Amino acid sequence: MDISKLKPGTKAVWGGETKLFESGSHTIPIFNTVTFAYNDLDDWYDSALGKREGHIYSRNTNPTVAVLEEKMALLERTEEATSFSTGMAAISNTLFALLRPGNRVVTIKDTYGGTSRLFLEFMPEFGVEVTLCDTEDHDQLVGEIGKGCDLVYIESPTNPTLKIIDIARIAQASKAAGAISVIDNTFSSPVNQNPHELGIDLVIHSATKYLGGHSDTLCGLVCGSRELIQKIFAFREINGASLHAQTAYDVIRGMKTLELRVLRQNESALKIARYLNDHPKIENVFYPGLESHPGHDIARKQMSGFGGILSFELRGGYEAVKTMLHNLELVHLAASLGSVTTLAGPPRTTSHVELTEAQRADLGIPESLVRYSVGIENAGDLIDDLENALNKV
Ligand SMILES: Cc1ncc(COP(=O)(O)O)c(C=O)c1O
């Protein structure tokens, strides 16, 4: 059977795991070893040169990690994938492996905070020119790409205001300019969106979020063509931001329920967004599944579900936010997202704490904004919890 033709839920369970493993093991063993020994020097030599299958050293490759990478390439419909110790390692290794002094990057203002620091602080120090565009201004983005660039980097939906970019349009413009296109697909997971199918070259995930799914592992993945992935892998081998076999196993286990979790989170987030949208104490709800969202039509075109993250603005400013958040009982007030547990926090004190109020306003992030990452709890219970907390405001 060709597993690449099957649906995401099946790929997440069986991808890389159809054969039986050592001693008939039904699940991939955790190869908890630094090195792989050989009885025959010629075999060792051939493995080291890639002339025969075989692992040498776990900073480079490891059988447990290889299963995760195969599963991920199947889910994102790419030739290959490679893994990293964190999502940020995946992003920085990709950029440092592909960019050289004198290169130019076109990106958006609303990238994840860590990524934004790479573009604003580190890349310029290495002689890479970075042009930031207004995230939803497609004409500006296409115009800047058309002026000539080496790499285009986007996210959609964005953090924390869920802005939507027309991925196929940006992929096409990048191709025409001869630039490598890269997207951070963390917010959607491969269940809701497959950017490679829309023409994007490299798809990055912080597997710390939906893929692992339980807020207990850090991991990053990059998916793309064999040629690009091998280039990034060659950099990671030496840079050393490798994934441990135990963590790879934890992510593999988490991914078995990826589709179940994401479909439920999509459904609950839409219910919660609609509930909040009708609430008199809520000024604004940001969720691409709402018909009123400015990116709704594009989102419908390129996403099969709208995701489990929404944000909303309270009437009454930051004091109202504090009262409401302190009265929620079915969330942890914490950074991160994509977990089985609902997590919430104001970008003002979490993801965008280092910016000034004016900088946040420039990104369209009001002081009274709350980001709410829906878990797998019962949606009715979450709405009751929100109702109770809003009554206290
Ligand atoms: C969209 C997005 N990309 C990347 C990252 C970085 O991932 P990690 O924390 O695994 O390094 C995060 C973390 O919050 C994120 O939200």
Image: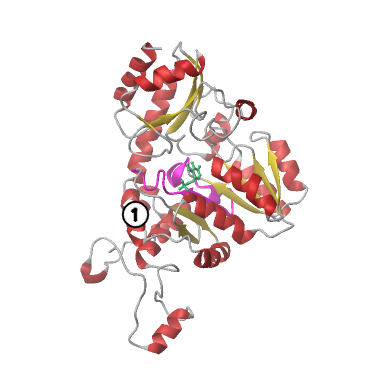
Left or right of 123 in this view: 224:
left
Left or right of 174 in this view: 62:
left
Q: Is residue 151 above or below residue 373?
A: below
Left or right of 108 in this view: 375:
left
Which residue is at 60% across, 43% downward?
Answer: 116
In the rendered image, residue 305, in percent from the top left (x then y), is placed at 45, 36
Query: In which image quadrant can residue 69 be found?
Result: bottom left
Which residue is at 57% across, 45% downward?
Answer: 115
Task: Indicate whether residue 210 is drawn in magenta.
Answer: yes
Q: Secondary structure at mark 1?
A: helix
Circle 1 packing at 10 Å, graded few (<14), some (14-19), many (20+), is many
Q: Is residue 391 visible?
A: yes
* Residue to which mark 1 is pinned: 252
Which residue is at 44% across, 24% downward?
Answer: 273
Task: Indicate whether residue 307 is drawn in magenta.
Answer: no
**Residue extent of the magenta highlight:** 187-214
Q: Which scheme is used to colour this image of the protein?
A: secondary structure
Left or right of 393 in this view: 93:
right
Q: Which quarter of the figure is the C terminus placed in?
A: top left
Which residue is at 35% across, 50% downward?
Answer: 255
Q: Which quarter of the figure is the N terminus placed in?
A: bottom left
In the rendered image, residue 86, in percent from the top left (x then y), is placed at 45, 52
In the rendered image, residue 25, in percent from the top left (x then y), is placed at 23, 65
